[in-house]
C-alpha cells in the first residue's frame, strides 16, 4: 500500500492551495481528483478570466451559521497575500467594479500557477481517480479502484453540489456524516431566480433586457445589474440576493436606482406634456421596461393627462416593485453551494475536525459562502492555506 503524509481529495482552488502549503513544509502530499484536469471551476470562472479574489474580504460578506468562523483564516491569508503570489507568477490582472480582480488573460494562468507550485513542492497529483472508499485505520486509507493510499492526514476539498455537469457531488458531506460531523442545510447560491408561468407571461417581452437595479430582501440590498430572462431574473444583483432568499419570500426591486421617476415625470409634464407616458419614462429606463412599468401601473396616454397620484403609482411600480420568485435555476447554474460541513465541528485556525484528529475540510465544502465577486475564491485560498500549515 502506498503511504504519504497527506492526502488531499479535490484538485480545486482550496485543495491545490492546501497541497502547496503542506508540500512546502516537507510533507509528502498526494492530491486525488476524479476529474481529468485540475482546477476546472477556476478555468470557467469569471467568463474564463477568473475573478480570483476581491481587494477586501470582510467577514460580513460571508454567510454561515457562525459568521465569525471565517475570520481567522481570512485574516491570516489575505487578498493581498494571494495577489502577491499572482504578481510573483507574472500574471497580469485588472480590477473591475467593487474590488473584483480578474486575470487579463486566461483563467488557466491561475491553474498553471498552482499546479506549478505543487510540482515545485513535490506534490503528487492523481487525476481521473474517483474515490471509492475512505476509511480510518490509525490514520486514513483512501481507495481509488485498485489503488489504496494511507496517510496520517486527510483533507476534504471536493467542494459542494454546484455545477454537477463538472462532476460536483455531495461527497464531502457524506465523508462528514461517515465521521459523525454535522452538515447544515445545503442549497444553491449565487443562482438565477425563477417565476411562475403567469408572471413569466407578463415579463416575456423583457427577456434579454438589463437594468442597473437595487434588489432588497429584508435589511439586505444589492445595487448591481439585473437581467430579465425567459425563466425569471438573473444578473449580479439577483445572484447576490439569491443567497438570502428562501421559497415564499418576496423581493423588492428598484428598476431605476438613482432616479426619482415620479418627480422627474411631474416636472416634465409642462414642457413634454404631449409625449406618451411610457415614452417619457423611457428616458430613464430601457423602452421595454418603461412600457411594462407604465402598463402595470395603469398609466397610459399623454404625460399631461397624468395626475400626481398616477405619477406616484408609476414611481411605485418602478422603484418598489415587489416580486415573489417560485424557485431558482438550482445547482445546474449555481456558482456555489450555501451551507455545508458545520463550522462548530471544525477548528477555526486549522480547519481540522475537532472530534477526528487528522481530518480537515476546506473551501466550498464548509458552511462558509461568500458574496459574488471573488470572495469564494478567497475563502478557498485562505482555508486551504490554513489547513496546509498543519496537515
Image (cartoon, grey):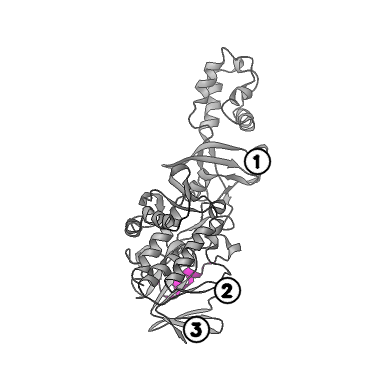
* Foreground residue among 37 and 180: 37
The answer, for residue 175, to whether it is visible in the render is yes
Task: Note whether 104 is above or below 283 in the view shown.
Answer: below
Q: Which residue is mark 1?
A: 207
Q: Which residue is mark 2?
A: 128
Q: Which residues are magenta?
A: 169-181
The residue mark sitting in front, 2 or 1, is 2
Are circles 3 and 1 on residues that touch, CB within 8 Å?
no
Which circle's residue, 2 or 1, is located before the other in the chain? 2
Q: Quadrant of the C terminus?
A: bottom left
Are circles 3 and 2 on residues that touch, CB within 8 Å?
no
Which circle's residue, 3 or 1, is located before the other in the chain? 3
The answer, for residue 217, to whether it is visible in the render is no
Q: Is residue 176 magenta?
A: yes
Taken as a whole, is the magenta stretch helix, strand or loop? helix
Q: Which residue is mark 3?
A: 148
Residue 253: horizontal and vertical position, in percent?
Answer: 52, 37
* Foreground residue among 188 and 145: 145
Residue at 50% over, 46% down: 249
Which circle's residue, 3 or 2, is located before the other in the chain? 2
Label 2 and label 1: CA atoms lie apart by: 40 Å
Amino acid at each position: 500500500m502506498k503511504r504519504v503524509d497527506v492526502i488531499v481529495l479535490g484538485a480545486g482552488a482550496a485543495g491545490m492551495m492546501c497541497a502547496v502549503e503542506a508540500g512546502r513544509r516537507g510533507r509528502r502530499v498526494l492530491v486525488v481528483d476524479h476529474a481529468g484536469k485540475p482546477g476546472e471551476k477556476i478555468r470557467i470562472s469569471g467568463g474564463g478570466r477568473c475573478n480570483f479574489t476581491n481587494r477586501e474580504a470582510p467577514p460580513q460578506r460571508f454567510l454561515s451559521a457562525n459568521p465569525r468562523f471565517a475570520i481567522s483564516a481570512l485574516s491570516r491569508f489575505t487578498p493581498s497575500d494571494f495577489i502577491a503570489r499572482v504578481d510573483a507568477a507574472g500574471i497580469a490582472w485588472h480590477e473591475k467594479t467593487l474590488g473584483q480582480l480578474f486575470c487579463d488573460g486566461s483563467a488557466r494562468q491561475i491553474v498553471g500557477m498552482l499546479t506549478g507550485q505543487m510540482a515545485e513542492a513535490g506534490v503528487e497529483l492523481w487525476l481521473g481517480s474517483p474515490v471509492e472508499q475512505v476509511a480510518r485505520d490509525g490514520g486514513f486509507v483512501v481507495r481509488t479502484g485498485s489503488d489504496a493510499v494511507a496517510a496520517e492526514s486527510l483533507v476534504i476539498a471536493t467542494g459542494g453540489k454546484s455545477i454537477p455537469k463538472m462532476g460536483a457531488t455531495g461527497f464531502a458531506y457524506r465523508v462528514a456524516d461517515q465521521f459523525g460531523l454535522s452538515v447544515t442545510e445545503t442549497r444553491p447560491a449565487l443562482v438565477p431566480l425563477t417565476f411562475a408561468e403567469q408572471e413569466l407571461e407578463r415579463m416575456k417581452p423583457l427577456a434579454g433586457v438589463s437594468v442597473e437595479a437595487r434588489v432588497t430582501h429584508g435589511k439586505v440590498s444589492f445595487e448591481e445589474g439585473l437581467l430579465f430572462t425567459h425563466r425569471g431574473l438573473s444578473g449580479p444583483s439577483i445572484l447576490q440576493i439569491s443567497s438570502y432568499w428562501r421559497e415564499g419570500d418576496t423581493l423588492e426591486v428598484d428598476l431605476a436606482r438613482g432616479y426619482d421617476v415620479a418627480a422627474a415625470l411631474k416636472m416634465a409634464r409642462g414642457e413634454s406634456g404631449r409625449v406618451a407616458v411610457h415614452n417619457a419614462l423611457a428616458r430613464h429606463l430601457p423602452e421595454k421596461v418603461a412600457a411594462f412599468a407604465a402598463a402595470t401601473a395603469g398609466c397610459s396616454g399623454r404625460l399631461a393627462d397624468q395626475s400626481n397620484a398616477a405619477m406616484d403609482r408609476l414611481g411605485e411600480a418602478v422603484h418598489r416593485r415587489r416580486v415573489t420568485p417560485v424557485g431558482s435555476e438550482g445547482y445546474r447554474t449555481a456558482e456555489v453551494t450555501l451551507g455545508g460541513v458545520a463550522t462548530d465541528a471544525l477548528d477555526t485556525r486549522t480547519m481540522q475536525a475537532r472530534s477526528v484528529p487528522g481530518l480537515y475540510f476546506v473551501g466550498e465544502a464548509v458552511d462558509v459562502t461568500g458574496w459574488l465577486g471573488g470572495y469564494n475564491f478567497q475563502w478557498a485560498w485562505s482555508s486551504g492555506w490554513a489547513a496546509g500549515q498543519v496537515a
